[in-house]
Amino acid sequence: MRELSIFIDESGDFGDYQEHCPFYIISFIFHNQECSITEQVEKLDQFLEYNNLKRHNIHTAPLIRKEKSYKDTDISLRSKLFRQLFNFVRSVDISYKTIVVDKRTYKNQMDIVKMITKELSSFIRNNYSFFQQFENIIVYYDNGQVQLNKTLVAIFGAMFGENIDFRGIEPNNFKLFQAADLICTLELIKNKLSCGKSLTASEQKFFGSASKLRKNYLKFFEAIEFGRKIRQDLSLKS
């Protein structure tokens, strides 16, 4: 049975617009389970275990800002953790889609839900032939936002019926969920830069500069964005 895994994470929430949190971002990672990632997962796990971080969930936003569990972690190890997760993403065969909600435009929860529903439904319809390849589609989400959870169940359920399976998730058990978190973090920074904002002091220290961030990280993610990745895969097969 051909199975597609979809790992979903988010940055921000459905709350009112605030200057420090202008966006709500949802990332979707798509993984054809016929493409094994066992070797890549084991390599990342070995790195974590070597650094006494066995079963650690790499959470990139606090990693960059030196917050929460990383408040006593020096920048050398934090940078290594970030690069290891980034290299993991580079080494596996996945694609992704992001939905970016600018809360200056969508000012209440109902508007945000409508926007997400419209964009996600349109994305699935426009790529329905891709999804039809799979007999089973498994959606992994940690149920962080009740509104998003209800929206996902409604849309995927309506589109795929009995072929869809929703599963809760423990982030430390799934590297692709951590990859979705990484994409959310970088997408948030990219959108803030596009609005004319500068890197924060912690981001500046972590990445060096906006140009280095674009060159070293953002440029790669453009190549595995869903539409480009699918077109690239089709061209390789032809």
Image (tube, rainbow, N blue to C red):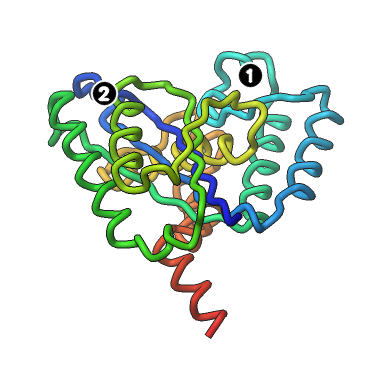
- Residues 153 and 83: in front is 153
Residue named by callout 2: 14
Q: Where's residue 120, x and y in %?
A: 29, 46
Is 132 above or below relative to 121? below
The secondary element bearing badge 1 is classed as helix
Please name the amino acid that badge 1 sits on.
Answer: Tyr
Between the C-alphas of marks 1 and 2, the distance is 26 Å
Q: Which residue lies furthest to the front in this view?
A: 162
**Residue at point 73%, 30% (across, down):** 77
Is 58 above or below relative to 5? above
- Residues 141 and 207: in front is 141
Q: Where's residue 15, x and y in %?
A: 24, 19
**Residue at point 76%, 40% (across, down):** 44
The secondary element bearing badge 2 is classed as loop
**Residue at point 58%, 56% (across, down):** 2
Residue named by callout 1: 70
Please name the amino acid that badge 2 sits on.
Answer: Phe
